[in-house]
Image (cartoon, grey):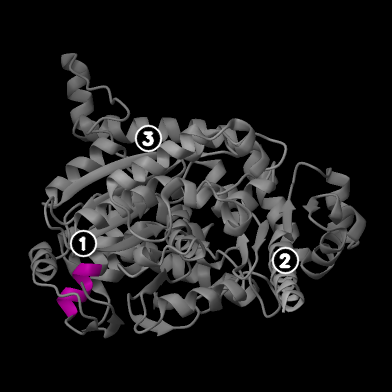
Amino acid sequence: MAAATSTATKFESNTEDQEKSEESITNYLIVRPEKGGMLDLLRYLAWADIGSGVRFLESSEEGIMGEEAADHRWIILVSIIARKIISLFGKPLEYTGFVVDFFLNLLFQNGGIMGLFLNFLQGKVVIPQRDTETFISSIGHLDGRIDLYRAENLLEQIDHSVSAEKTITEEIGNRAHMDLCIMASKLAYENAEVVRNIVHHWKMHFVDFYNCWNDLQKEFSTQVFILCDKPKDANLILISFRGTEPFDSYDWDTDFDYSWYEIPKLGKVHMGFLEALGLGNRDDTTTFQYHLQMKSTNFNYDYEGSGSLLSNTDSDMEQNELDRSSDSDRATAVGHKKFPPEMVKKTAYYTVRKKLKSLLVEHKNAKFIVTGHSLGGALAILFPSVLVLHQQMDVMKRLLGVYTFGQPRIGNRQLAKFMEAHLEHPVPKYFRVVYSYDLVPRLPYDDKTFLYKHFGVCLYYNSLYIEQKVDEEPDPNLYGLRNVISAHLNAIWELIRSFIIGYTHGREYKESWFMVLVRIMGLALPGIAAHCPTDYVNSVRLGKERVVHMSSF
């Protein structure tokens, strides 16, 4: 009897050891454009020299580098070349952004060119001050609309909502709900003071604005804000991540990055997006294991406990436990490097998760939405994916939906299947909006054998703002002569439309001179111009009638 018990115990121990061993096996691929030279790039490009291609790669296994360099040569080449160009023009792009933002706000705050001229004559020129309530981002100048679509209907819908799930077929309610998400996604590009004022303008409750730590960049480069529909007994909590800033080379570099990290049982995930959420650093890949493989570390439980919603007191007690743990223990958890706990607490994922859990405890009937445009859309869908990975199921039960606009691909088909099981039943909760020839949703490149795959419900709008519900946007890669010609012809039409849409659909749709300038630039780079939030706002407001199955408040 004792022998049988001993055998069973050994079997269980061996099984646990095997599971831990499987979860400790981590595969990753990092594309490093700086590692190889121009001669290596030429050999890889012209003669398909795999050895030269491998010089740009770093991986957990030698075999992975060779396979990737051979199987996905053109994709890796695009990533390397694009990121080398972005790196070359990174500083000039940043300086250009400062000048453009300053000039746009100088004109705006002085009443245009004539107002600026008169103020100059009178010695009353208003000098723009960054991070103030009057300093608007370049995205805000592209599209100056701040009012919600039929705001009174949205607030009424929230106030009279119920917790049961149902099908929303009312056109106004559906559009108003999606409009809140795209307007919040657009608003995330602004500074904290602008966000606070506009949320109050919407007659909603501003919770907080966060500048979060990116350990790879060693700066606070991930922005996100949170609002509630009202300060007491809220029904809705909305989390909005900032997207790709037009003059931020780091953001564009992330969009064109091909690097991935494989999470056991979840799938391969875009490494740059994980870093933006604060879940690792490619310079020390053991940090990804620290944050993403729970059974190999107690960090997630130490920080906020289990997946249940904690009271503020419980959360504070467990936070104190983390603070009292020794530096050596934390260093052991991530390998040879010490991961500063004060920086962990300032990363986007942990900051937002902690605040979200406290809000869900405070507002018993509230559900939450996560949204974002561009890079912000990638973070918006990745955030609940990691919640599921960390077994935060009590939090996920309160998820109303994820709405992304112009979002790049975040992972492979395995990740898609994993998340579809959590976001499509009993009704779809993940909606991915794509406008026309927007380039960013086609990144990173995808084909029949390639790694990155989209998932969720795709609401595709063409340049006439006609909606189609599809599994994948048309022309998913925008390569080939036919697609290039079609994209440029479409850009010509969009430029013409920019002059007439204010007359055909009303003054609120009249495009700014800055947006028209971007349309002109779009004749050369149509996929970039189509990525602007303007067309996403128009798509939601002007799209044809739709019936969308989604969860209710």
Q: Which residues are magenta?
A: 171-177
Whole-angstrom CA distance, mark 3 to mark 2, is 50 Å
Q: Is residue 26 visible?
A: no
Query: What residue appears at the point 55 percent right and 67 percent down from the top-left corner?
Result: 442
**Picture disc at residue 22:** 2
Q: Which residue is found at the position 37% from the left and 41% from the top?
A: 317
Residue occupying image coordinates x 47% and y 55%: 375
Residue denoted by label 3? 101
Q: Mark 1 Cα within 10 Å, few/some/many (few <14, many 20+)? A: many
Q: Tag 3, which secondary structure?
A: helix
Residue 497 lies in what quarter of the image? bottom left
Give the spatial CA distance, label 3 vs label 1. Answer: 33 Å
Residue occupying the point 36% across, 75% down: 429
In the structure shown, which secondary structural element does the residue marked by tag 1 occupy? strand
Q: Residue furthest top?
A: 123
- Mark 1–mark 2 Cα distance, whole angstroms, equals 40 Å
Tell me if residue 172 is in the magenta stretch: yes
Could you tell me the amino acid type at mark 2? Answer: Glu
